[in-house]
Structures are given as structure tokens and as C-alpha cells.
Amino acid sequence: MSDFKTPMGRVRGRGSAKDGTQTFWHQRLTAIALIPLAATFTGFMIALTGDDYTSAVDTMRSPLVGVAMLMFLLIGFYHMSIGLAHVVEDYVHWELGKIGLIIVIKLGCLGLSLACVLSVIKLSFGSAA
Amino acid sequence: MAASITHRITGVGLGIGSLLLTCWLLALADGPESYAALQAFLGSWFGRLLLLGFTWSMMYHLCNGIRHLFWDVGYGFEVATANRTAWAAFTGSVLLTIIVWGLAYLCRGDV
């Protein structure tokens, strides 16, 4: 009687990602959210094409634009961190390299999303250029 | 098969695109000089090529992603259907890319 785990407890969290089905579900959830968010983002970038600095800064001061951008960025970077890690898990079979790359992906996505969020917040609260 | 690997390649491509987006937001938040420098880079032929790749990657990943979501709930697994939707995703992504760039050039006002 050295193992008190149930069969379910023993397999939970296995698989190459070590976290069971949670990332699978989160990837689908974020994918659905990203359909309207990516469409909104694309429309926003089209509208900004050719705008000078002043009007681009003015557009970014709108709270609605800020919220839409933050949703797209946060959900997008989360979706990206899961997806890129998944690609590494499938193609990199050297354990040390795999873990190293996944750390780079997770920290990189976190860093990039923070840089984006800070920029959006600064622009949202900023004065007109 | 081809659609599946393209989904992954465009996903990785979007990772590179996210670097561009981060630079764009940082430059805009930093001030007019940084923004002008970044706009000059994005306006160059290489910058436009990157943006075109970014646009098509996003449109393909979006179209083919919808296909994957239908698979997840059990629709469209028949080989004939899967082949048809693979082509639809590819064609749709090219059309959407053309539409996005057409509208962007219209917004610039220098077609």
C-alpha cells in the first residue's frame, strides 16, 4: 500500500504538456474569442493606415479602442503561448531543449503582452499629441 | 495534411507578427520620433512584405481555425468535406488578404 492514488489521479496531468486537457480547452476558448477580436483589430489597423502620429495617438485615447486592443492582445498572446508551446512539444524531442524553448515561449509571450498592455494603457491615459 | 502544417506555420508566423505589433505599440507610446522611424521601416518594401505575410497568416489561421473548431464538435470529418473546406480556407484567406490590403490602400488615399 505505497500508492494511494486513484487510477484517474495517476494519469491526470500527464501527456507531454504535463497539464492534461486544460490547455486544450483554453486554446479552443481563446480561439472562439479571437474570431471577433481579430476582425475588430484588422478593421482598426485598416482605419489607421496612412494616419500620422497625431491621429493615431488620438484614436488610441478612445476607451473603446483601448479595451478592444487589450482583449485582443491578452487573449491573443495567451493563445500564442499555448500554440507555440504545442508546436515545440510535438517537434522537439530532446527534453532539455524542449523545456528551455517552452520557458522562452512562456516568458517571451508574458514580456511581449506586458509591453503591449503598458503601451496601450499609456496611450489611453495620455493627452492628445 | 497541407492545411494542418500550414496552420502551424502561419501560427508561428503570427508569433513574428506579434513582434511587429509590439514594436508598433511601443513606438506609438514612445513618441513621434520612434513612430516615424517604425513607420519608415514598415513602409519599406521589406516592411510591406512582412505586413503582407502577417495579414495572410492571420487570415489563413482565422479561416482554418474555424475549420478546426467545427472538427472539435464533430463536423466536417469526411474526406471530401475536409478537402473542400481546406480549399475554402485557403481561397478565403487569399480573398480576405486582398480585401484588407485594398481597403488599407483606399484609407491611405494614394491608390
Image (tube, helix red, strand yellow):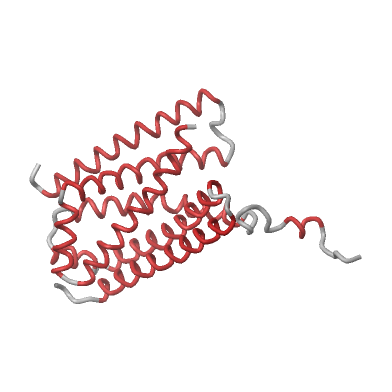
Residue drawn at point x = 56 percent, y = 34 percent: B75
Q: Quadrant of residue A12?
A: bottom right
Depth check, front residue: A49 or A43 = A49
Image coordinates of residue A13 in percent, x first then y, are 68, 58
Q: Quadrant of residue A53?
A: bottom left
In the picture shown, does residue A27 fall above or below A1? above
Q: In the image, A1: left or right of B17?
A: right
Image coordinates of residue A77 in percent, x first then y, are 42, 59
Residue drawn at point x = 29 percent, y = 70 percent: A119
Q: How many marks?
A: 0
Question: Where is the C terminus of chain A found, in terms of image quarters?
Answer: bottom left
Q: In the image, B74: left or right of B66?
A: right
Question: Where is the N terminus of chain A found, in terms of image quarters?
Answer: bottom right
Residue drawn at point x = 49 percent, y = 58 percent: A101
Image coordinates of residue B2 in percent, x first then y, are 45, 32
Query: Quick one: which residue is furthest to the right in this view?
Result: A1
